[in-house]
Amino acid sequence: MALNLYWMQAGGCGGDTMSFLGTESPDVPTLLQTLDVDLLWHSSLSNLSPARHGELLEELTAGTRPLDILVVEGAVLQGPAGTGMFDARAGRPRKDLVAALARRAGHVIALGTCASFGGFGAGSETEATGLQFTRTHKGGLLGADFLARAGTPVFNLAGCPCHHDVLGNVLLALAAGVPIALDEFQRPLDWYGTMVHQGCTRNEYHEYRVEEEAFGEKGCLFFHMGCQGPLTGGPCNKHLWNQRSSKTRVGVPCFGCTNPDFPAAAPFFATGNIEGIPTALPKGVSRAHYMAYKVMAAAAAPDRLKQRITEV
Amino acid sequence: MASRIIRDLPFNRVEGDLEVSIEVSDGRITDAWSAGTLYRGFENMMKGRGPLDGLVMTPRICGICSTTHLTAAARALDAIAGLTPPDNAVRVRNVALMVEHMQSDVRQSVLMYMADFAHEAYRAHPLHAEALGRYAPAAGSSAIDAIRETKRLIEVIGLLGGQWPHSSFMVPGGIAFAPSLANVLQCRQIVGAFRAWYERRVLGCSIERWAAVGDGAALDAWLAERSEHRDGEVGFLLRFGRAAGLDAIGGGPGAFLSYGAFDLPRETAVAAAGGRLLAAGFASGTTIRPFDAGLVAEDVSHAWYRDHGALHPADGETAPYASGQAGRAYSWIKAPRYDGQVIETGPLAEAVVDGRPLFVDLVGAGRSSALVRQLARLTRPALLLPAVDAWLGELLSTHGAPIVAGEGHVPDGEGAGLVEAARGALGHWVRIADGRIAGYQIITPTAWNGSPRDAQGRRGAWEEAMIGIAVADPENPVEAGHVIRSFDPCLVCAVHAVRRRS
């Protein structure tokens, strides 16, 4: 049965669309075709006239035309002073339109960290928020108790941008009627239940605490370069980017972009530490045991790592 | 009897949100006001952050040209730190940036520009059925082709930079990782496959044959020469565009700005004057003068910001002031001017400033138009691909050479990173003080092209380009859409940021 989908771009960069266009197996046209998705509107792709688009919005918000899936990309801007006029559409705040569509939608998908948690503008004068969270605080535009028409909360497909394969797979699950298990921040566990660290080709360097201290060295990026991979859930090293690689594989630290508090206030490319031990340790570890383990691991490091012979 | 109506119209397929008010009198556009209606807040959000944070924050301004913002941010830090990236860092930066431009040129042309050709407003056009088969959103044959081929091309940035969009692999003095020989070989294979598709389906001829098209007459001869030329995307653009009159509208301000791009490595087989593949300059008509960064200033007289008069971006500020300017203000986009003049920027400006014969001839003959502007964009990959090939080849022969200079430390100081984005001139002006970002001002190509009026009341480039256009249906002025989209607007880039509350 056909699913219809309305894709709203709000206060964002369009990067989640650009990322999505990079999905493979199936690619975007094949995905839409095989799932029989009727793309009612996408800001970057549709060629409806302004008048026809206006009619469509009226039908959807009035409920005279059912809406199966609402995808929101970008943060909801509530500033200045709660008016929402930092992001206006036809002289009215976009936030009101997002809320009106969400109330009618079978499922609501927040695509990317901005739509999920507010992202860059959360806490700023733009008063950015996610659909059902503002950073780690549940609520957001739609409220903590919001459920879409099908009884599901907002699906937070976090990431800056969201990994290109996640949306397609969530659509597959929705079309199949399969339940989607979520974590505490409403991110699907299938995609965010793995640490970004897992699968990184620098894992041996991490294991034996052989560290990168200058750009271009072979080594682990966790101890000096600010890598958040061991603290961040995401598929970057499990499914790779653009079918090829990941940031950490090419010496760029994970910046924790799937986390609700992204971007953190602390400078990037630097690890906060006390006497060489990072103040934020891999998710869930015991500090005392971790420190003992790292001292022993460094002592056990093989020469091929200490001499940076092993490739990353 | 004269009729005068004013319509406020939203435009999509422009990377973000644009609303344009047009005044139509007797079937022609007699005035236009272009408004960026989104205010996102990046510049002041940067203040107080770590000195390298522009490498992470600014790519996220724009989903379609994140590598370009990364390049500008890295170049600003290179300048502050006084670092010259080694040749292989220059090659990797260039290749990644050129790949990003090429995906943007193809996606914008096919998915965003020519999608209008499949619009029902053209149902009487003799080529409409073919246009529908090619450009129907996410379903036409060319649309599907463009999505698939650009997705594969982008894998090059995956290999060199880890991911696309939004990576941060360019760092002060170079890049963060030396690609392996296997990585470079894979990049060559991907680029080779893209080139074969681009020649077959977009140009309908070899890049060498296209490069021989040196003036307007040669362009007509090329189009008449073979059915393959007419059937490619370029040929279809010309045939449909001419029949729809796009060669007669949207001429623009007649002044062009390019910051120049793609530094040549010190040792390279790629030849270009001035040490860069694309020259920097300002052109009035086709008269080219050297570019002087000191002549850039931003006017906010008609934008929702506090107004201190026109400021050079190194001294600029971004203070939103929604109720200011006594009702004159209508946009979140500032109005940059060069030496006080309204200019256009983008692939056509690059071509004119770079002295490329076809576009110099067309512009010199007064034939600049929405169609010529789009032609410059869709054919830019023909200029870039040979250099991409050459630099990937050089990365094989120089494998193991340094990829980064310096220690990654950026001292206090000021610097600018000026590059050509897919849409034209992009500048980051950065000031570091006490080990933190103290100032960050960005002028995007869409600020140049899509600016509101300035203090002298002069319209922005595409506002002006719309004046005089005949529109068949004021409720759906596809003609104005062609002109605006020929500038490849990127509204997500053109917006500015506000200060984080303490």
Image (spheres, rainbow, N blue to C red):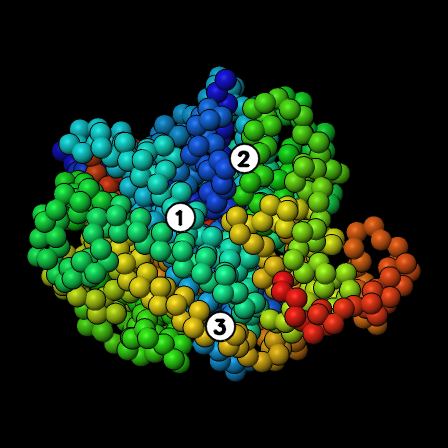
Q: Which residue is mark 3?
A: B399
Taking the spot 51% from the left edge, 55% from the top edge, the residue there is: B158
Is residue B218 visible to us here? yes
Front label number (2 vs 3): 3
Residue placed under numbered mark 1 in the picture: B150
Above or below, A7 relative to A38: below
Secondary structure beneath label 2: helix
Residue at left 35%, top 41%? B145
Q: Which mark is residue A231?
A: none
Picture mark count: 3
The residue marked by circle 3 belongs to what chain? B
Which residue in the structure is indicated by mark 2? A168
Q: Position of residue B101 (x, y in %)?
A: 38, 57
Earlier sequence position, callout 1 versus callout 3:
1
**Most extreme residue toward the right, as rendered?**
A288
Left of B167 or right of it: where is A257? right
